[in-house]
């Protein structure tokens, strides 16, 4: 298996910079951003230059370490102000707040903040590798899975969540084919998932989101694997908008529907999916994002939630770093 993509997020400790792959430039250009200001970090997260729940959590952790390193002496009040600003950039993905809170819980010296950020970075790699190991046991040689959005290595430091089982299966010599939904409106499946799988030498077929039902009906899909941005205490799961529809289809066609996520994505404070805050994004993502001319009349209202919620009863099992378990056992 080829893996030529650099780490999605990393810490240039020597020069005190947060390094990110600019995912808005993919698949046509691999550009590494070196960030050191709060404004740069806010913009990078909000505009999806870095995205994916694990990746933005790691980015925020390293970002706080970099911001502390830019201070003459660590100013606790200013550091907390920066932390709050970063939390507000993406409200749905709980990993962002989890990583920031962990950073604020350590002694506020530059050294301790840097070491904690690096620990979070290393743990993400190991956690995703373990998710991949557990998930690969569910895959047989010759299987084809359907995935949505991008929950691969570009959504984490390495491996990713929903695609980690595919990467580990490939390392084990299994041949697994991936069907990737394009993921409207920002095309993360087309621009990112198809890109990273092709770079890794894993067979991938791209389809429009509205083709998933016919594909499942054809019998060519073995299972659906998605990531998660937040899992409520009862097992309800928020993921990229469109995930709910796929879960309904998978249930109708009798296909397993797996959610791959680290323990940090499970939110003890959120009772059900109804309490998960759903980020709303700008109308331009639907009307003008990819086109020279408008694709909708200027007077049309736009509904653009970034996420929807898959009810626990539509989920076959959660795959975490600790293993595979049905939703009710995974619920906190």
Image (tube, grey):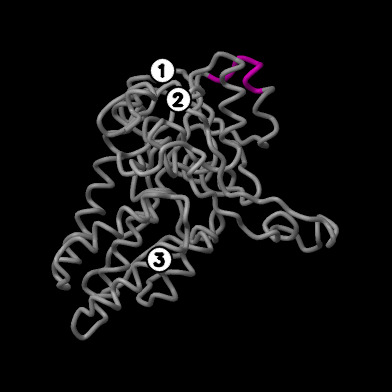
Q: Is residue 50 left or right of residue 123?
A: right
The CA distance from mark 2 to mark 3 is: 37 Å
| x and y percentages locating residue 59 in the rendered image | 35, 60
Q: Which of marks 2 and 3 is in front?
A: 3
The CA distance from mark 2 to mark 1 is: 6 Å
- Disc 2 vs disc 3: Cβ atoms closer than 8 Å? no
- Mark 2 surroundings within 10 Å by alpha-carbon count, few (fewer than 14), some (14 through 19), many (20 or more): many
Q: Which residue is drawn at 47% across and 34% down?
A: 226
Counting residues from the start of the chain, the first of labels 2 and 1 encountered is 1
Q: Is residue 145 found inside the magenta-colored segment of the image? A: no
Secondary structure category for the residue under label 3: helix
Image quadrant containing the C terminus: top left
**Can you see residue 225?**
yes
Counting residues from the start of the chain, the first of labels 1 and 3 encountered is 3
Q: Which residue is the extreme one toward the bottom?
A: 72
- Mark 3 surroundings within 10 Å by alpha-carbon count, few (fewer than 14), some (14 through 19), many (20 or more): many
- The stretch in magenta equals 215-221
- Mark 1 surroundings within 10 Å by alpha-carbon count, few (fewer than 14), some (14 through 19), many (20 or more): few
Give residue 73's quadrant in the image.
bottom left
Dot label at residue 86: 3
Image quadrant containing the N terminus: top left
Residue placed under numbered mark 1 in the picture: 141
| x and y percentages locating residue 328 in the rendered image | 37, 23
**Can you see residue 6?**
no
| x and y percentages locating residue 322 in the rendered image | 25, 30
């Amino acid at each position: 298996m080829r893996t030529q993509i650099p780490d999605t997020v990393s810490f240039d400790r020597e020069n005190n910079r947060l390094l990110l792959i600019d995912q808005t430039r993919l698949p046509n250009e691999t550009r590494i951003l070196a960030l050191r200001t709060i404004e740069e970090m806010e913009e990078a997260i909000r505009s999806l230059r870095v995205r994916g729940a694990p990746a933005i959590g790691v980015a925020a952790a390293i970002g706080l370490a970099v911001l502390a390193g830019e201070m003459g002496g660590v100013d606790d009040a200013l550091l907390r102000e920066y932390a709050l600003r970063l939390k507000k950039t993406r409200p749905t993905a709980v990993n962002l707040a989890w990583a920031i809170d962990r950073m604020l819980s350590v002694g506020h010296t530059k050294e301790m903040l840097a070491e904690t950020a690096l620990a979070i970075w290393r743990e993400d790699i190991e956690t995703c590798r373990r998710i991949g190991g557990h998930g690969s046991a569910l895959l047989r040689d010759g299987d084809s899975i359907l995935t949505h959005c991008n929950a691969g290595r570009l959504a984490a430091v390495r491996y990713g969540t929903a695609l980690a089982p595919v990467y580990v299966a490939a390392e084990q010599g299994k041949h697994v084919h991936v069907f990737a939904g394009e993921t409207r409106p920002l095309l993360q499946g087309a621009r990112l998932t198809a890109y990273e799988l092709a770079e890794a030498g894993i067979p991938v077929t791209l389809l429009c989101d509205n083709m998933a039902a016919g594909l499942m009906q054809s019998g060519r899909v073995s299972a659906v694997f998605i990531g998660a941005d937040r899992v409520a205490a009862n097992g309800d799961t928020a993921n990229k908008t469109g995930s709910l529809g796929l879960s309904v289809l998978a249930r109708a066609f009798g296909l397993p529907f797996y959610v791959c996520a680290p323990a940090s994505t499970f939110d003890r404070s959120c009772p059900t999916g109804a309490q998960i805050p759903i980020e709303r994004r700008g109308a331009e993502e639907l009307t003008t994002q990819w086109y020279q001319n408008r694709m909708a009349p200027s007077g049309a209202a736009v509904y653009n939630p970034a996420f929807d919620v898959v009810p626990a009863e539509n989920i076959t099992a959660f795959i975490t770093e600790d293993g595979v378990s049905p939703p009710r056992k995974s619920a906190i």
